[in-house]
Amino acid sequence: MSTGANEVNSNESLADVAAANREAEASGEAGRQVTKAFGEFAEERRDYYAGTFSKIQRSTLSPFHINIAATLGSFVWAALRGNWFLFWVGFAFDMMAAANLGLVYRFDQARQAAIEDDKGYLVERFTDWTSNHLIAAIVLFIVGRLVIGWLADRSYYKQYSAWRIDPSKNNGFKLQRLVLAGVIVTLIAPLTLYRSTQDAPGARDCLKLVRAMQDGKEVATKDRFDCATLSEVPTLMWFDRPPQYSYPRNDDGTRSIVVKESTSKRQVNLNVWLSEIIDQRIDYAKAFYGYIFDSITAVLRSLLNAIESVFVATPWPVTAGVFLLIAYHFAGPKVAVFTLSSMVYLGLFGFWQTAMSTVSIVIASTIICVVVGMPLGVWVGKSRLGSAIVTPILDVMQTIPSFVYLLPAVAFFSIGKPPGILATVIFAMPPMVRLTALGIKHVPESTKEAALAFGASPRQLLMRVELPLATPSIMAGVNQVVMMSLSMAVVAALIGAGGLGFVVVDALGQSEIGRGLIAGIAIALIAMAIDRIVQRANKLEEER
Amino acid sequence: MSNPTPSKAPTGDPVVEVSEVWKIFGSRADEALKAIRQDESLGKAEVLEKFGAVVGVKDVSFDVYQSEVFCIMGLSGSGKSTLVRHINRLIEPTSGTLRIAGVDVGSLNSKQLRELRADRIGMVFQNMALLPHRTVRDNIAFALELRNIDAFTRSQTADKVIETVSLQGYGDRYPSELSGGMQQRVGLARALAADPDILLMDEPFSALDPLIRRGLQDEFLELSKVMGKTTLFITHDLDEAIRMGSRIAIMKDGEIVQIGTPEEIVTQPADDYVADFVQGISRLKLVFAHTVMTDPDAFQQAGGSIEGHETWPTQSTEADLDTLIGEAVDCETPIAIREDGKLVGVVTKDVLLRGIQGES
């Protein structure tokens, strides 16, 4: 500050300067400086914005303060002020209100039609809808305006703060911005309003329409526009139906390939075309490389059999006792009590065998996840190449909803427990790999360097330094794997993996809510018990 | 140049020979090296811009002798840690050779290199770099374990070293239960456990608070005297370098600016950079009579009289300023500096004051 009363002599002490500043503030001189900046920012209606902003800075702005201009102008005001956030909010509210008005128009038309057709129940329904949407339109409009009016000065002040830091940010009051706003409005508003005032064609009608177009029949432009342009993205590519392959077995056990050209003249869209191609590839792989899938299935089945022979075949008092001991030993008395009560629940409701079958699947897939995932994680953690290859795959695996995994499992391994395990493994593996890699990466460079300086070989480095230091992270990975395996083992009941999940799926299918609920609680109890035991054990281990 | 004190003069064959070592970081290091060799004036920034390469160590040569504590002193980024990591080949030089007891380290295969690291070289790190999941004893025995020495021998050896660094009773604790100073004792013990010939100490005491640092320095000096291990001691602290080092190499921007005994460094700084460093250093224990004394003839020419010098207090040429001051305080006459009974120099109070000031 270098004007008037604020000018200070360089040899005055700091205290004097501070005193001078305080005085200037009191006399309004410093205040005026800030106010000037407010004015420069606002350009139009400087005094109003200077006043509001200083109230905001002093926290004296009334909680009910509303900017009248913004309330009336809404997104137009926001555009003029260059506040695009408020523009979109305001525009969205007004658009929703307008769309509701469009609906009012549409249902009113429908009501007229129903009156002409003399369908009393329809008239009643459409009358209801018309008034509902009218109310909605009014409420949305008023609420939207009030929201904008309330937000306006507060958001504009934020814009001011940003502008102070970066003067290239929008400020002032510029008519040119209305052009951009106009373009946005003309791009969005007409189509949206058109949609709301017209009856949307049903999917089946559209399919008929497409067929008719393929057969070369005349189709009204409006229908074509409604179906193929507004509802769906227009289909640009049409394909000939791919030929049908089959692979019958010959007398000598070999298979031959039989091709049957498609007889349909209708072309298909990309979706249908690719699905058929994929189906054929899978059939081909199953026909000629079936032994691969069969042997994988066999391995999974024998692993599962081994585990099931322990958990399912052992009499329940033995297994339950062992579980209790494990819980007590690794996680302490509290968790043991919880485990006991969960087991009592399972027993009372007759879920013991079913639960053990689920637990067997969980254990089988956990074993596979750890055995495969840990080395993979080490590779990812240590090698840039490994990370470059595996990380994107893991990303994809984790983004895909668990449900979708069932598909390839069924495609190649049909249904049953082995494909269930496989789907579970694919679903539950990523955290194992990731957390192992994370643990390995987080081993301090200096510790590794020290080990090398004392003559450690790469193998010794891994086994005696990196893996031990990564253990907490690896254990967290195992915990995750167990929990995710359990959740997926339940979903895998859909492809015949059995267990508690099957009870839920079955109950769902037959609308037996009670049975499903009891089984669902059993699953939740198992999950909680396992989680408690593993987490508590990890915690105790770390404390040691 | 005055004679360096004989006791500190390097003798015998060098244990570590570093000759013309260059280290340039970056994928185009070789190109960069060629360019720098052709054009000496190529600066750091230019190398970085042209080749995307960073010069870590620039044409460094020195020898370290048996039982010597050789300090490498420099500020952070001067390349001292990089340099020391070449000795056990944790870092490969871009060019140049390193020999340990005459053997070219660069020629070793990975097995021989591991043996060298495990048997011959112990290393201590600034951040200790102990293994948190192992007890103190197991940490110390780590190098032995890597050489597949049986557990019994390991723990015996470890216990012996634990005693050496006065950590008795802590063998079964975990590093996290120990204070910083004690952790660094463990680090030192780990380096000593395999009884190596050479100790590499990478700023071992820098992370410790001053009192503990001083204590450890003293202890290490004691140990060093007893064990006589050839030591490369890295530090950014000139005081520490002077306390610990029999010789000091001062590094700047990857180059060695000066190598010399502490006295040489303090009394004859090679350039302004070193002079700047040395400025605040107390000279009392570093400057000796032979540096400050006036020649008897010159003394007489300047109008002084050496009459009756037989009765003057006598000191050897090895006496430091501190001793000389103690002597001068209680007497009127100058101090006579004698070697084998013969008068070789005179130290007056004026000379002493100048000597302390550093403008002899």
Image: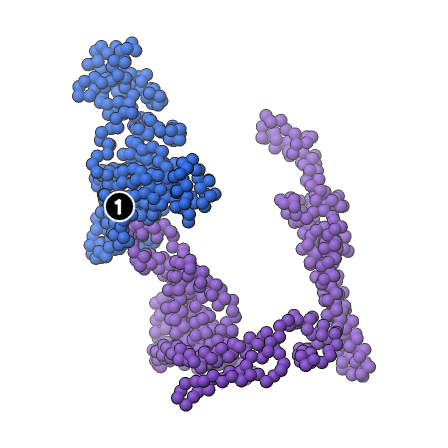
- Return the residue nearer the eye: B306 or A11: B306
Return the x and y of residue A121 as percentages of the image width and height: 76, 82
Q: Answer whether residue A375 is visible to the viewer in this image.
A: yes
> Is residue B333 in view from this perspective?
no
- In the image shown, does A69 or B358 lie closer to the viewer? B358
Between residue B232 and residue A270, name the one nearer to us.
A270
Please tell me whether mark 1 sits on a helix, a strand or a loop.
Answer: strand
- Label 1 amino acid? Asp
Reply above or below: A1 against A421: above
In the figure, the purple chain has which letter? A
Residue drawn at x 31%, y 52% is A452
Q: Residue at x 47, y 73 (%)?
A: A488
Residue A111, image x and y in percent? 79, 77
Q: How is the image coloured?
A: by chain
Q: Which residue is mark 1?
A: B104
Q: Quadrant of the C terminus of chain A?
A: bottom left
Q: Residue B16: name its quadrant.
A: top left
Q: Relative to A81, does residue B343 appear above or below in the rendering?
A: above
Chain letter tied to blue: B
Image quarter hosting the N terminus of chain A: top right
- At horizontal 37% and vertical 41% (from top left) the residue drawn is B57
Picture quarter containing residue B96? Answer: top left
Give percent across and percent down for residue A194. 75, 69
Circle 1 packing at 10 Å, graded few (<14), some (14-19), many (20+), is: some
Q: Residue at x 62, y 82 (%)?
A: A265
Left or right: residue A26 versus residue B331 is: right
Percent x, y of residue A260: 53, 84
Return the chain for callout 1: B
